[in-house]
Image (tube, grey):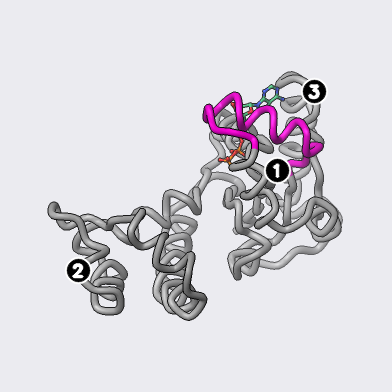
């Protein structure tokens, strides 16, 4: 199965890009969604979090108190590593489960942390949605109604644009309108279909 990892910084246009490919009947597995599923009530990862961090991170209805947990791990790197030790393997397992259910010619794994986490080992190719930082800021502020400092702090914590560009196999520059985004994706879609059919002339791994 050919899996394309789609990544990019906050507000770069990952959702805009993956929605477009989903409209072409390509299965999109969303790492953010997987990270929420694995901490739903009844899931083993939530139980492990309760054991490690106590009832203070569980709300009265049994769901995870994300804010409380965020505050704990923000201030304590050991706690953060422990949390990641619980969640990362569970997220990877959920992603793999969903990838295995896909029957489209190729599958897209969309993840903001594809390169920062081990999720990139689940894909054969990395597609970066790349935008200049000013545009990233502008679009995110407009979309979320948040202030500039908040977005800049998130951007500063993410891998740099240059490092992402270096590691990508394909780069879509999303600096104009959606028509331009779609045009670039159309080309890549054709390329990925060929790769999936095995007639692209390029060897790629199999999962
Ligand atoms: P996040 O990582 O924060 O979830 P994302 O990478 O999924 O973000 P999107 O939500 O797809 O980014 O895009 C950010 C905002 O910019 C959205 O409001 C989207 O509609 C808008 N946007 C994306 N691409 C374009 C474009 N080419 N032209 C105009 N607006 C765009």
Secondary structure mainly formed by the magenta segment: helix
**Front residue (pair 46, 137):** 137
Is the CB atom of the residue marked by disc 3 within 8 angstroms of ligand 1's nearest atom?
yes
In magenta segment, residue 205: no
Magenta segment: 129-148
| Mark 1 or mark 3, earlier in chain | 3
Q: Which of marks 1 and 3 is in front?
A: 3
Q: How far apart are marks 2 and 1 (CA)?
A: 48 Å
In magenta segment, residue 142: yes
Q: Which residue is drawn at 23% across and 73% down?
A: 54
Quadrant (top left/top right/bottom left/bottom right) for the C terminus: bottom right
**Front residue (pair 128, 189):** 128
Mark 2 lies on a secondary structure that is helix
| Mark 2 or mark 1, earlier in chain | 2
98 vs 205, left or right, is left
Category of crowding for the residue at label 2, using alpha-carbon neighbours closer than 10 angstroms: few (below 14), some (14–19), many (at least 20) = some
Residue 105: percent from left, percent from top? 60, 46
Q: Which residue is drawn at 74% across and 55% down?
A: 198
Quadrant (top left/top right/bottom left/bottom right) for the N terminus: bottom right
**Front residue (pair 84, 34):** 84
| Vertical arrangement, residue 167 with respect to residue 104, above or below | below
Mark seen at residue 193: 1
**Front residue (pair 173, 134):** 134
The residue identified by callout 2 is: 55
Mark 1 lies on a secondary structure that is helix
């Amino acid at each position: 199965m050919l899996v394309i990892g789609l990544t990019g910084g906050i507000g770069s246009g990952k959702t805009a890009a993956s929605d477009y490919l989903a409209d072409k009947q390509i299965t999109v597995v969303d790492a953010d969604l997987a990270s929420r599923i694995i901490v739903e009530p009844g899931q083993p990862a939530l139980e492990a979090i309760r054991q490690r961090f106590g009832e203070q991170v569980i709300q009265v209805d049994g769901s995870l108190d994300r804010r409380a947990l965020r505050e704990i791990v923000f201030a304590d790197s050991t706690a953060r590593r422990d949390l990641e030790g619980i969640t990362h393997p569970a997220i990877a397992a959920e992603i793999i489960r969903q990838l295995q259910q896909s029957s489209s010619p190729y599958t897209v794994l969309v993840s903001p942390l594809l390169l920062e986490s081990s999720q990139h080992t689940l894909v054969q190719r990395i597609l970066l949605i790349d935008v200049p930082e000013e545009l990233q800021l502008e679009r995110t502020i407009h979309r979320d109604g948040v202030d500039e400092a908040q977005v800049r702090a998130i951007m500063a914590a993410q891998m740099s644009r240059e490092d992402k560009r270096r590691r990508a196999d394909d780069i879509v520059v999303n600096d104009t309108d959606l028509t331009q985004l779609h045009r670039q994706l159309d080309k890549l879609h054709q390329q990925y279909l060929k790769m999936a059919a095995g007639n692209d002339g390029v060897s790629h791994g199999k999962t």
